[in-house]
Amino acid sequence: MKAQLESIRSAALSAIAAAGTGTELEAVRVQYLGKKGELTAVLKQMGKLSPEERPIMGQMANEVRAALESAIESQGAVLAEKALADKLAAETLDVTIPGKQAEIGHKHPMYTALDGFKEIFINMGFEIIDGPEVEESDYNFTKLNTPDDHPAREWSDTFYLDEDSRILLRTQTSPMQIRAIEEHGVPIRMISPGRVYRKDEVDATHSPMFHQIEGLVVDKGITMADLKGTLNAVIREIYGAGTQTRFRPHHFPFTEPSCEVDIQCHKCGGKGCPTCKGEGWIEVLGAGMVHPKVLRNCGVDPDEYSGFAFGFGLERMAMGQFKISDLRLIFENDIRFLEQF
Ligand code: DAH
């Protein structure tokens, strides 16, 4: 039995030393010290020994167990330390490696123009409201006093979304005049920027989708003088203090009287050049006094209230402000173009 214990001790100690992981070490422990382990099996034979031999062998067996237990414990500590070191080595970061450059976009010049525009109107006490791009022809045309036979209602000009010509992609932001009064009542001072759609071929000055900014003021005693004063102030904020304007009679179904507003060409000072196509003036918006029928269509009494409305083309404004010569550049989103502004 002594020889058996000796051989268990040396075999177990070398197995413990050879264990390379916690799992292997545990397997060695079970193999020798477990319930069905080799040392346990020897101890079970103790009963067969003579009474003189029993304490000697018992003591030796305890020594072997203690030796194995302490060897397992210290090897366990060594392995845990090694595991930690391996993990740290595997997870090291080289903080000196150059980072990946994040591509940062660029604010679109049209939105720069729009933000400037909004700021001017907010400072004048206007609200900014959003409206639907999918619109009813009632709002886009009828309530805006547009006759049934108006050419803009043709299928060749407008994107309809149903067979009965009742739902369409709005052709102008003017339906927001009606929606704004219906929702907020009068008096009102608002602008409403957004996309509009027309069946136009793409070229340097046309796109089937573009942006307008609608404006509307309704209150008691609003006159053409308010329209001119407000628009002159806005135009001089955008195009410079000395900008000359010209209010030219025009026709829109929803305003009476109506006008188009031109600014004197900033390139040639009015003499005529390629920028103004030889005219000396550049058209910047349509405007007018809200038609009494439009007010009535919104439940507002035109004998009590009056107002003015206007519509800017946002692309045209941005193109003027940033000297962009081709409308297509605005929609292509080429970063080389956008980064110039
Ligand atoms: N909606 C017009 C258009 O698309 C522009 C316009 C003209 C808007 C006169 C107005 C206005 O509010 O009063 O051509």
Image (cartoon, helix red, strand yellow):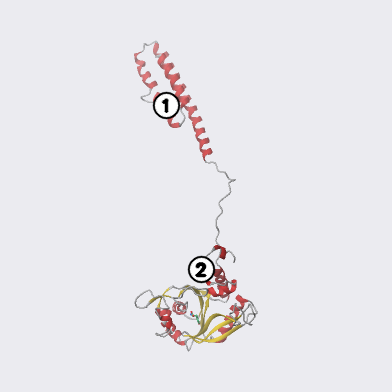
Report the front residue among 247 and 12.
247
Res. 294 in view: yes
Residue 42: quadrant of the picture: top left
Instruction: Give the label on residue 28, or none.
Output: 1
Q: Rounded to the nearest whole Å, what is the CA distance between mark 2 and mark 1?
A: 73 Å
Counting every numbered tag in the picture gives 2
Q: Which residue is mark 2?
A: 331
Q: x, y percentage for residue 133?
A: 44, 73
> Within 8 Å of ligand 1, the CB of disc 1?
no
Q: x, y percentage for residue 121?
A: 56, 75
Going from the N terminus, do you reach mark 2 or mark 1 first?
1
Up/down of 23 relative to 150, above or below:
above
- Report helix, strand or loop for mark 2: helix
The reply to whether the C-beta atoms of the residues labelled 2 and 1 are less than 8 Å apart is no
Up/down of 112 relative to 17, above or below:
below
Q: Amino acid at mark 2?
A: Phe
Q: Is residue 159 left or right of residue 124?
A: left
Q: x, y percentage for residue 251?
A: 49, 86
Q: Amino acid at mark 1?
A: Val
Mark 1 crowd level (few <14, some 14–19, many ≥20, 10 Å Cα):
many
Mark 2 crowd level (few <14, some 14–19, many ≥20, 10 Å Cα):
few
Report the front residue among 304 and 19.
19
Query: In the picture, which quadrant includes the C terminus?
Result: bottom right
Front disc: 2 or 1: 2
Report the front residue among 197 and 272.
272
- Report helix, strand or loop for mark 1: helix
Query: In the picture, which quadrant includes the N terminus?
Result: top left
Q: Residue visible at 54% across and 80% down?
A: 285
Res. 192 in view: no
